[in-house]
Image (cartoon, helix red, strand yellow):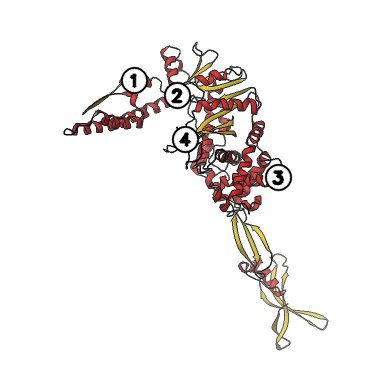
Amino acid sequence: MPYFPLAIGGIPGTLVPMYVEVVPNRDSPPAVLLRGGWREGSKIRKRTVANLSDWPPEKIEYLRRVLRGETLVPPGEAFRTERSLPHGHVEVILAMARKLRLDTLISSRPCRERDLVMAMVVERLIHPCSKLATTRLWHETTLAQELHVEDADVNELYDAMDWLWARKERIEKKLAERHLREGGRVLYDVSSSYYEGHTCPLARFGNDRDGKHMPCIVYGLLTDAVGRPIAVETYPGGTGDPTTVPDQVDKLRRRFNLLRIVLVGDRGMLTETQIEQLRAYPGLGWISALRSEAIRELLENQYVNMSLFDVQNIAEISTPEHPGERLVVCFNPLLQEERRRKRQDLLKATEKALDKIVKEVARRTRNPLDKAEIGLKVGRVINRHKMRKHFSLTIEDGVFRWERVETSISREEALDGIYVIRTSEAAETLSTDDCVRSYKDLGRVERAFRTLKGLELRVRPICHRTKDRVPTHIFICMLAYYIEWHLRDALKSVLFDDEELEENRKTRDPVAPAAASASAKTKKVKRVTADGLPVQSFETLIIVLGTRCRNRCRIASEPSGPTFEQHTDPTPLQARVLELVGAYVPCS
């Protein structure tokens, strides 16, 4: 205990011990006094040195500790933080993955390959990149530590991908058992992504939906009725959408053992040929839509009359040309207006470009353009806006004229705003409104494709070289989307997602354009939740979660001593996310 000099008994400089004493006051706050104490014979004497009543409690406590002889060190000098690793996003994603039992879905027994696959799936959500970059970047978060893959190299990741490919069908079957039921609906659609390289036999030129003039790879995604991914198949570039349907039927019936199921696909997928093949399976139902040519035939044969829509926007009909089918005709005036506006814009853009060619041909008097040269120029313009059928073209050597074909435009305008859903399902099992809603649910698969191709998962560019690893890469992306789907479902209160969307889908007008709920509009305007937390997109939320770190610390006075770990306290938003994920119960 420190001693301080006091003048005692007329003798200056006498050393006496000092202490802090709290003296109660009857009707006032207690007095906090700094006192010196000493013994005179059998009596204890005290002297007040200072009144500390105005000091803050923490300052008084520091003084007490000094008077007890403790050595106080500033917090910044007590221990050192040797390294901080982003941890919050890893913590949340792994918590959801384990809640979904994704690890046991991949393999019922723990093994090195399972840990590596889990790490690749989670890294896809944190920072999608090549497998080599993955082995670098997961050391910059706590992911490698959490899954004990710190020593993994890229060759081990490739071996784990080969291991996963051998288990793909079993994993998809487990997902189907978890989420698909007899008599339920499945959604199916196809997309493609460009390929960088020349060695993969799946990469071929074809209908590339990315808009790049590069070889592409086609893949078809099968989901349950709410958009959860169940299975994905990969096809060579240029594979037509309808030709992938038999594989899905075989998968549903043989691999998933589902005899009664309803397949929902768009009109480009479930063509007349494919529907005829589906009829061979009595328990397999389908929902699709008619092409514009078939709708035009309905109008011309008077099966559809616009007077049907004077008081309603939906009507059910049947025709001899579609025996055993229900046809649900829908009319959306807003869609009609939008299509006509877009067509006029495209016509004007085409006319403007054609007028330039007319002027160019007229100027070339000394060296006139021949028929082939004019045709090439016109072809580029016509193909750009897909308006060839609405123009009559005259192309000769040194001559070019055009004019609109108003009858063709009017004939197409008659279909504006009209679409027809077709189904094999009876009215007893699927109402007219639910038939339309089921077809529109294909938008859930489109959302999956946007996520796979977007910044969250970045399925492209595809850089793998073998015919097995390219599909495995796409399968890993699908598993990552499986986690993301459930994260979005659990965290929609802190995301810009509409929290009432699922309930509204069941009751809203199936034909009218979808409208956001009042709560979703308020969230987008105020940009804060009901709790006052900032609303996030999924991408920014992952970044915000990553600011919660795991720190490796060491006692400053013991440079060679042991280290310990400490997590930064979660912010209110991070704490809310952890609470939501912890309380979330995945639905089957």
Query: Residue 395, how many percent across, how many down?
Result: 25, 26
Q: Nearer the viewer, mark 4 or mark 2?
A: 4
Residue at label 1?
408
In depth, the one of 285 and 161 nearer the eye is 161
The residue carrying pointer 3 sits among few (fewer than 14), some (14 to 19) or many (20 or more) residues within 10 Å by Cα, namely few
Work out which quarter of the rendered image holds the N terminus and state it.
Answer: bottom right
> How far, Cα to Cα, is label 2 from label 1?
22 Å
Which residue extends farthest top?
320
Q: SS of the residue at dot 3?
A: loop
Q: Which of disc 1 and disc 3 is earlier in sequence?
A: 3
Residue located at (16% from left, 34% from top): 366
Question: CB atoms at circles 4 and 1 under 8 Å apart?
Answer: no
Q: Which of disc 2 and disc 3 is earlier in sequence?
A: 3
Q: Which of disc 1 and disc 2 is earlier in sequence?
A: 2
> How far, Cα to Cα, is label 3 from label 2?
54 Å
Q: Which of marks 2 and 1 is in front?
A: 1
Q: Nearer the viewer, mark 3 or mark 2?
A: 3
Query: What amino acid type should be assigned to the residue bearing mark 1?
Result: Ser
Q: Nearer the viewer, mark 4 or mark 1?
A: 4
